[in-house]
Structure formats: structure tokens, C-alpha cells
Image (tube, grey):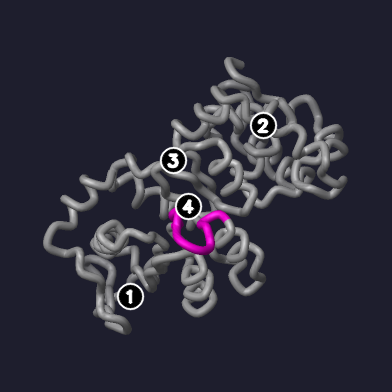
Amino acid sequence: MDERIAESSAGAVAESPAGAAAEPAVRAGTNEPAPDPIRILIAEDQALLRASFAALMNAEPDLAVVGQAAGGAEAVSLAAGTRPDVVVMDIQMPGLSGIEATRRICADPALAGTRVLVLTMFEVEEYVLGALRAGASGFLLKDASPQAVVDAVRTVHAGQSLLSPQVVTTLAARGAGSACVAGAAGAGPGAVGSAPALGRLTPRQRDVLVLIARGLSNAEIEAELGIRRATCRSHITALLARLRARDRAQLVIAAYEAGLVRPGN
């Protein structure tokens, strides 16, 4: 995606002046004020990519970049100061890693409404699991299209989670479930996806959890299991509560770490 984003923002890669105010927006065809844009913080150590991401986001009427960080520590600091809705986070950065920065941001009560979308070149299993355990709501690779990145920001802001198909495939193909069971085994009874909590799931809830881990949407789960939309939502709500998961992404982690999903199934 590096080249595509750079091309889509050619001539507009310079970072916006700090404190620049945007013109008030109105709904098309009305005098009503438009909804507040989604406030975004970009954490990326490569200046060209950082500015390209900013240009891509600022070109959308419902998105606004409120800060840009060149490292993890700066991202944590800027997040505390700007309280963005979404942080677009790289993983490999000098000093504090993107995973640790994600952990600190997600652990800050003042940033409870902030979602983190990890955007990286690497689909390494440790990065995927580390980012999701740290609290990231989404994991996307940098070879995604510019539109996919923009849509991902909107998705995580809406309170949903997002894992690119490549990431789900990576978890399954590399046996993340069996590789990480040891980590789950050492978790206490109150941990996300702990054995006692998994043991309390109904057979149908387990079915839903497995399908979530395979990357199916709610509509696909409903079709697969022959259940109604309200029933599907009820099962997912119960899973979130029983497994003490923050969002769908953590449900995926719980399923893999419990070995409910394995390569080829």
C-alpha cells in the first residue's frame, strides 16, 4: 500500500500546520452542521508514510487527523493530550514499540473511548497476537488499498473490530491456537478467555465463537447456524461478558488460545 497511498496523496504529503482550523462543515443540501469528524492520531516512524496517511485521511470529509507521532512514546503522549477517536498505529518504531504504546493507550481510563487500529507491513503471529492482547481493535496490513484503510478506521470507530483476511489466515496456518495455549493456561480465572470462563459457554456459544475466529461476519454466522439476527447478537453479547473480552478481536484471541480453532478446521 505504500506506493498506492503515496500516489494518491502526491503533492499533498507535507504535514499540516499545527493548530490549523478546519472550515465548519454542513450536511449536503442543508444548513445543518455535519457530525463531528472522526479524530485520528497517526503513529508511524517513516515521515513520508506518516504524511501520506494524513493526506489520505484528511481527504475524507468525516475524518480529521489531530496528531502525528514518529514513535510509540510520542503516540502515548499525544493520545493523552488530544484524546483521538482512533489511533492508527505502526508496530516497529524506535524506542517504545507500537504494541507497548497500544497497551498503554488502551489501559488509560481517560482514553476509554479511543480505539487502536494497527497498520503494519508484518503479519507475524507474535505481532498479531501481541497487538490484539494489548487492546487493539483492528489489525490491517500495509498492502491494503487506501479505501480499505479508510473503511477500517470507520469500522473500529463504530465499536467493531477488524482483522484482515490475511491475518486470520496467518493465525490458522501457523497454529496460533496450539502455540499460545501455554499462555492461556497460565492465565487466572478472571483473564480474557480463561479455562473456567470457556467451560461455562453453551454449545451454541462455542459454535458462534469458532465462526467469529474464522472471520465470519454476523450475517454469515446467522446463515451458517440458521439463527436470527437478534439471537446472533445475544450470543455475541454473552460471549463478550463471559470471556471478559473488550471486543470481537479479543474473542478471536480467546478462541485460538483455547485451541477451538486449529489449522484447516
Mark 3 and mark 4: Cα distance apart in space: 9 Å
**Considering only vertical position in the picture, is 242 above or below 217?**
below
Q: Please name the predominant secondary structure of the magenta segment in the image.
A: loop
Task: Specify the segment rendered in magenta.
Answer: 89-99
Q: Is residue 40 left or right of residue 115?
A: left
Q: Secondary structure at mark 1?
A: loop
Residue 60 seen in the current view: yes
**CA neighbours of label 1 inside 10 A, class few (<14), some (14 to 19), many (20+):** few
Q: Which residue is mark 4?
A: 91
Q: Nearer the viewer, mark 3 or mark 1?
A: 3
Residue at image location 35% in from the left, 49% down from the top: 149
Whether label 4 touches label 2, CB < 8 Å: no
Q: Quadrant of the N terminus?
A: top left
Q: Earlier in the sequence, mark 2 or mark 3?
A: 3
Q: Nearer the viewer, mark 2 or mark 3?
A: 3
Residue 3 in percent (x, y) is at 21, 46
Mark number, residue 256: 2
Whether label 3 touches label 4, CB < 8 Å: yes
Q: Nearer the viewer, mark 1 or mark 4?
A: 4
Residue 129 in percent (x, y) is at 60, 42
Identify which amino acid the numbered label 4 is placed on. Answer: Ile
Identify which amino acid the numbered label 1 is placed on. Answer: Pro
Mark number, residue 129: none
Q: Which residue is mark 1?
A: 33
